[in-house]
Image: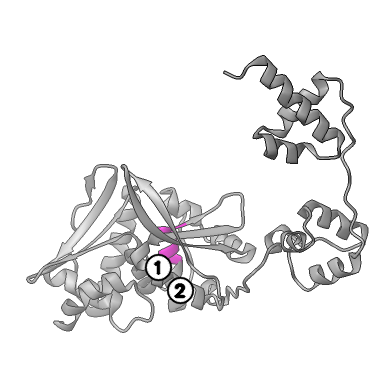
Amino acid sequence: MMLLEDQNRINNQIINDYLSGIGMSKLGFKYHKDWTTIKNILIKYNIKIRPKSIKKINNTSMIRKLYLDGQSTYKIASRFKCSPFLIRNTLIKEGILIRNRSLRQRKFQIDVFRLKDLSSEIGAYWFGFLLADGHLYSNRHRIRCSLAVKDIGHLYHLSKDLNSTIPPKKSMIKCQGKWFGRGYMVINNKELSDFYRKNHWFDFKTGRIKKFKINNLNMKHFLRGLWDGDGIVTHNQKYLRMGFCDKYECVVNWVKYHLRRLVKNECGMVLSNNRTCKHGPIYAVYWTGSQANQIASILYFNSLRYLRRKFEKISPHILQI
């Protein structure tokens, strides 16, 4: 425990440093204390607190030019070694209209035209995949997709289809006491977020599947996107097993209905109406043998977008058809 004499000595040093012009934040860093603790010490010894100084920037024309060229207030603040709020207030005083929140800090250009065409392979596939493995924020214009780190290459295809240079990133997560690598990509775009909301994203994700009705949806590529996200693909030397799982039974049954309909229309085969089983907190349905081969062939043969890890499992069985 610190002796009273030592504490008084440190307090006197803090007071002398403050009176010499050093700010409370720097004193907190120097004496390993929070700035509010420094302030309380000064008040205790009746030291008059200096008013907060407002930093002024003389080169407002440069700030104006940088902001209009597309740089963010954070990047400009880093260049001038001040807070972004000071940059923002300077721009407002200069009569500059601050960019919309969804456009701030835009580092990468995004073109969502291909993803908004749900009748095309690209649009339908990514809609299904993001519904399975993506997260749309309810109160932000942001979509986040996380995959196992071994599948991070798939996110580069997503960036390519957005005509963007958004790079996927890596992180580590802890699950049941073990650390796992994850690859993820964040898409900040109001147009795409509003488009997915309009097309019943949250109805599908929360099991209100009766409201999930979309015109001109390319069902084949949409189902493949779902399968790459929440599908089950296992195989051995003899047979392939294709399954789909979700936490809502009605969603699994919806996928089963449209898959059986698709297979019948494509090749005339009638898939077995297999029972949807419950495994812990999720529901699942499976097909094996020739029926699984047929599902794999229809969903994955001659396709442009697919998860390579799953395609490598089913490709030998596709060639047998």
The residue located at (80%, 19%) in the rendering is 44
**Number of dots carrying numbers:** 2
**In the shown orientation, is residue 228 left or right of residue 184?**
left
Q: Amino acid at mark 1?
A: Ile
According to the picture, the residue beneath numbered tag 1 turns out to be: 152
How is this picture coloured? one colour
Whether residue 41 is in magenta: the answer is: no
Which stretch did the figure color magenta?
Answer: 127-134
Between 19 and 210, the one lying in front of the other is 19
Question: Is the residue 319 above or below the residue 291 in the image?
Answer: below
Whether residue 133 is in magenta: the answer is: yes
Q: Position of residue 129 (x, y in %)?
A: 41, 65
The residue located at (33%, 57%) in the rendering is 254
According to the picture, the residue beneath numbered tag 2 turns out to be: 156
**In the shown orientation, is residue 271 left or right of residue 71?**
left
Q: Position of residue 101 (x, y in %)?
A: 71, 58
Q: Main secondary structure of the magenta part?
A: helix
